Amino acid sequence: MNSASNNFPHHLAELRERMQHPTDYEKAVHYFLEEFAGDQEFVRASEVDSRPHLVEVLGRVASKAIGRTVELEGVLVSNLRAHQFIHGNAQADGRIVLFFYFQEADTGMMMLILGVRGEGDVARFHLRGGLTDPQKN
């Protein structure tokens, strides 16, 4: 558990494969929570980043899941640059938002969780054209 940093290429490949399942996104969610979420080395290896386009898309996905327009609050976007893997968290309407995004696959997942033991929604998303690097704009 929480061992993603022991072998990033292996664990990211496994996460990406589970995320590609046509209907069962929960496989990816559980894997992310088990292998990445509590891994302090994973967190330390990631740099805080600014991805306004991603945050905008996540806000739209969260709004659609909740059924009305909501704003993301306390957004933290982190970038594991060497592996082109972006991840983070936020809050929306009192819910926890966890997300990750594979840049080379232009595919990500967002988990919207009611609370520590509450049920949640999971959505897979794509960004048309991928993410631009704000440092290069």
Image (cartoon, helix red, strand yellow):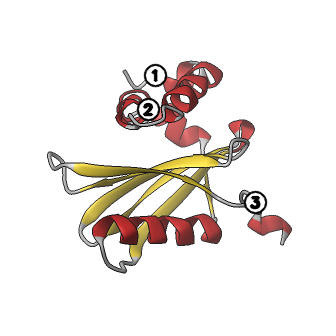
What is the C-alpha distance between the residues marked 2 and 1?
A: 6 Å
Q: Is residue 131 left or right of residue 30?
A: right
The mark lying in front, picked from 1 and 3, is: 3
Q: In this view, does 67 lie to the left or right of 53?
A: left
Residue at mark 2? 39
Q: Which amino acid lies under the numbered mark 3 shown in the image of this protein?
A: Gly
**In what element is the residue under mark 3?**
loop
Please report the residue visible at 63 percent of the width from the left and 69 percent of the height from the top: 53
First in residue order: circle 1 vs circle 3: 1
When the figure is inspected, residue 80 is found, relative to residue 125, above or below; the finding is above
Residue 85 image-quadrant placement? top right
Q: Are marks 2 and 1 in contact (CB under 8 Å)?
A: yes
Residue 97 image-quadrant placement? bottom left
Q: How many marks?
A: 3
Q: Quadrant of the C terminus?
A: bottom right
Q: Which of 19 and 38 is in front in this view?
A: 19
What is the C-alpha distance between the residues marked 1 and 3?
A: 32 Å
What is the C-alpha distance between the residues marked 2 and 3?
A: 30 Å
Q: Is residue 95 left or right of residue 39?
A: left
The image position of residue 105, as x and y in percent, is 69, 42
Please report the residue visible at 61 percent of the width from the left and 47 percent of the height from the top: 107
The image position of residue 39, as x and y in percent, is 44, 32
The local crowd at label 1, few if under 14, some if 14 to 19, many if 20 or more residues have their Cα within 10 Å, is some
Q: Which amino acid lies under the numbered mark 1 shown in the image of this protein?
A: Ser
The image position of residue 24, as x and y in percent, is 38, 34
Residue at mark 3? 129
Residue at mark 1? 3
The local crowd at label 3, few if under 14, some if 14 to 19, many if 20 or more residues have their Cα within 10 Å, is few
First in residue order: circle 2 vs circle 1: 1
The local crowd at label 2, few if under 14, some if 14 to 19, many if 20 or more residues have their Cα within 10 Å, is some
The image position of residue 115, as x and y in percent, is 19, 54
**In what element is the residue under mark 2?**
loop
